[in-house]
Amino acid sequence: MAGAVAVAAGSLARAGHTCSAARRMPPISEPVYSEHLVPPPPVTVVVPARNEVPVLDYCLRGLRKQDHEPMRIVVVDDDSTDATAELAHRHARIDPRITVVATAGPPPGWAGKTHAMHVGVQAAGAGQPGEWLAFIDADTEPAPQLVTRLLATAAELDADLVSTPGGPPAGASLVWSLLMPPGTQLICENAAPDGRRGRKAFAIGHCILVRRTYFDKIGGWGALAELGNEDIALATAVRDAGGRTRTVRSLDTLTSHGMDPFDRGWSSFRKSFSVGTQGSIPLLVGAGIAHLAFGLTPPAALITGWHGRRRWLIAAGVVAWGAQGVAHARAAQAMGATARSAPAAPLAWTLVGGLFLDAARSVRRGAMQWKDRPLAALRRRQ
């Protein structure tokens, strides 16, 4: 009985926090067209790519259709073993705005993606007056107005960093309905979408637009070289340097192909949980057990209360299940996913518990990798 009441109270508290965080994630702004002859700011887009042949074409086609100018695109082939470089060069031959550079992989002390983005910025050269940098994952598909609307959002919200998630593709896997909502809730419990102080600043690595002056001010990617959660680290560093950061809902401006199929999405969350706990096996195991209990308690309370005719137990189960469902729906909507899976919220939290335990197992075995590389942030533990 006490456990069911505690889970019900925790579910209500989590639902309140999630709804509050979702309200602080406004939709991406509409483009602003001015009659005044104000030159649009230059934007350099950096696309880190490692073994991305199945998806890179979507990304580069979308970037080439952007309605913003001036814009240049730097694709970084991060020591791919497939035809990623050839595909990128094919686009570069068609579009002179695209530059392709290669890296032999990260040196000691660097995470792979962070180093690739660093190489891309270095290849772009010194910043231009008023320049913005956009870091866009190779497994995303941008709509033609993405960059224009990101810049409009930065202007409207007076932000120096704007981040937005990608929505699910057609035929998306169950990752979007079962893992994305609780995963988003966990991130928002530790990082603020509006960058408010007291916690870390929320950002999503799928798509980040940052003012070049602030990027240089914090020391660029070199200051964040070994971190696996480079998106939140970048936003927090910009916030702490005096900049304003915002995460907004992308609506129909960006599609993410990187969480499908299901096993890839599972691996992505497992990596994020491992990095977020710095590979601490006790923390991972503790979080796994706690979230298994959090997910299993509502249905268990209902079943036990129904058979034992314990009204308070039934009430606790209903409250917990309902609160988890409300939070699930709000988090799903914020990420562009369907809210129809809200009744499955207890199942989703049970899966999250399994994810934490799976992450603990992988860390213990020294098998935690991402894109066939050990995670730099966990090397010391492994």
Image: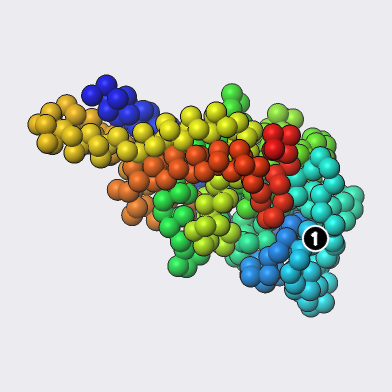
The residue lying toward the viewer, choosing from 382 and 47, is: 382
Q: Quadrant of the C terminus?
A: top right
Q: Picture quarter containing residue 182? A: top left
What kind of element bears circle 1? loop
**Residue drawn at x 68%, y 65% as measured from the top left:** 52
Q: Is residue 349 left or right of residue 95?
A: left
Which three-letter amino acid code belongs to the residue tagged 1? Asp
Q: Which residue lies under the disc numbered 1? A: 79
Q: How many numbered marks, from 0 up?
A: 1
Asked whether the viewer can see residue 353, the reply is yes
The residue lying toward the viewer, choosing from 259 and 167, is: 259
Q: Is residue 270 left or right of residue 73?
A: left
**Residue drawn at x 59%, y 43% as measured from the top left:** 362
**Residue drawn at x 34%, y 52% as measured from the top left:** 341
The type of colouring in the image is rainbow
Q: Position of residue 111 (x, y in %)?
A: 75, 45
Q: In this view, does 104 lie to the left or right of 142?
A: right
The residue lying toward the viewer, choosing from 98 and 84, is: 84
In the rendered image, the residue lying farthest to the left is: 309
Asked whether the viewer can see residue 23, the reply is no
Q: Position of residue 327 (x, y in %)?
A: 38, 40
The residue lying toward the viewer, choosing from 367 and 116, is: 367
Q: Looking at the picture, does residue 237 appear above or below residue 268?
A: above
In the rendered image, the residue lying farthest to the front is: 365
Q: Is residue 353 left or right of residue 204?
A: left
Q: Position of residue 360 (x, y in %)?
A: 55, 38
Q: Position of residue 149 (x, y in %)?
A: 61, 56
**Residue drawn at x 78%, y 76% as measured from the top left:** 90
Q: In which quarter of the image is the N terminus?
A: top left
In the rendered image, the residue lying farthest to the right is: 126
